[in-house]
Image (tube, grey):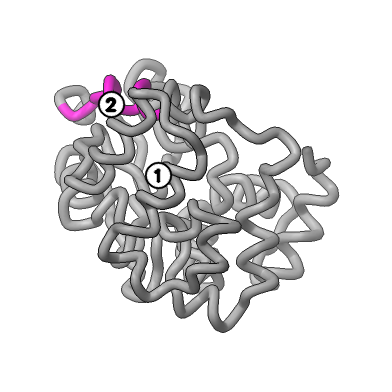
Amino acid sequence: MLSPSHQSNVLRDICPHAISTTLQVFLLTLFLHREFLQLSLKPQELAINYPERVSKLVVCSTGSYWSPDEYNSKLMSAMERGCSLEELTNLILSVPFASDYSRDFLRENPIAVFCLTSQFINENPDLAKFLLQLGAEYPLSLEGVRRRFSAILRFNTQARLKNIKAPTLVLHGRKDVQFQPDQYGSSLAKAIPNAKIVIFEKSAHFLAEEMNEVLKVITEFLL
């Protein structure tokens, strides 16, 4: 696992507009989604249940619930029946939105189709591989991935979002194929009092395509 100092150095290289070590480490973790359940879901619960402890809230590429579309449902079904990694990869390669990606790149990094745009990968292949492989030191098994998505499917805070008191910033990429902003981001922003949504038109789930703009929006909101 990357140490905080290493995380900070990585983010400084990628996003020079980050202004403090603490913020850099936070944003890097947020950006990489290394702890998806913790970063995307638990803050909502914290802000709902302990409003006095949260002065500002940032939620990124997520929702108050998740209802998988046709293609994500097929992937979930395959994992439920205990498919192999090769079968899962072939399923990912078959989804329509994977057609713009290099087949060789996706076979090595199948999750890329859900995280980064093909344009970003084509223009930054080494950086894309680096970002996608940062968690490779502690990889999840297929069973671990299945359990994670099962937990996400059970998560739903929509009816309780009105209890969030903190000013909230909702960030989404227009090209996110897992948490589409018009469905998930908009429902979050409408249900949370004093929430603002910012959609990055060129970005997918990681928001890597417009990270300097993402950092600018977050720092302005937090400071």
Q: Can residue 169 be seen in this view?
A: no
| Three-letter residue code for mark 2 | Leu
Q: What element carries label 2?
A: helix
Q: Depth check: 180 or 100 in front?
A: 100
What is the spatial separation of the Cα atoms under label 1 and label 2, in whole angstroms? 18 Å
Q: In the figure, 223 relative to 188: above or below? A: below
Residue on which the image places disc 2: 153
Q: Mark 1: which secondary structure?
A: strand
Image quadrant for the C terminus? bottom right
Percent x, y for residue 149? 38, 29
Span of residues in magenta = 149-158
What secondary structure characterizes most of the magenta part? helix
Quadrant of the image containing the N terminus: top right
Is 69 placed left or right of 215 in the picture? left
Residue indicated by mark 1: 59
87 part of magenta stretch: no
User: Residue at image x 29%, y 58%?
Assistant: 95
Q: What residue type is labelled 1?
A: Val
Along the line of sight, the residue nearer the viewer: 138 or 207: 138
Q: Position of residue 71 (x, y in %)?
A: 24, 48
| Residue 17 horizontal side relative to residue 117, left or right | right
User: Is 153 within the magenta?
Assistant: yes
Q: Where is residue 115 in the image (x, y as percent from the top left)?
A: 46, 57
First reached walking from the N terminus: tag 1 or tag 2: 1
Query: Is residue 162 or residue 122 the one in the foreground?
Result: 122
127 relative position to 101: left or right:
right
Name the residue located 54 percent from the left edge and 80 percent from the top edge. 122
Viewer-nearest residue: 167 or 189? 189
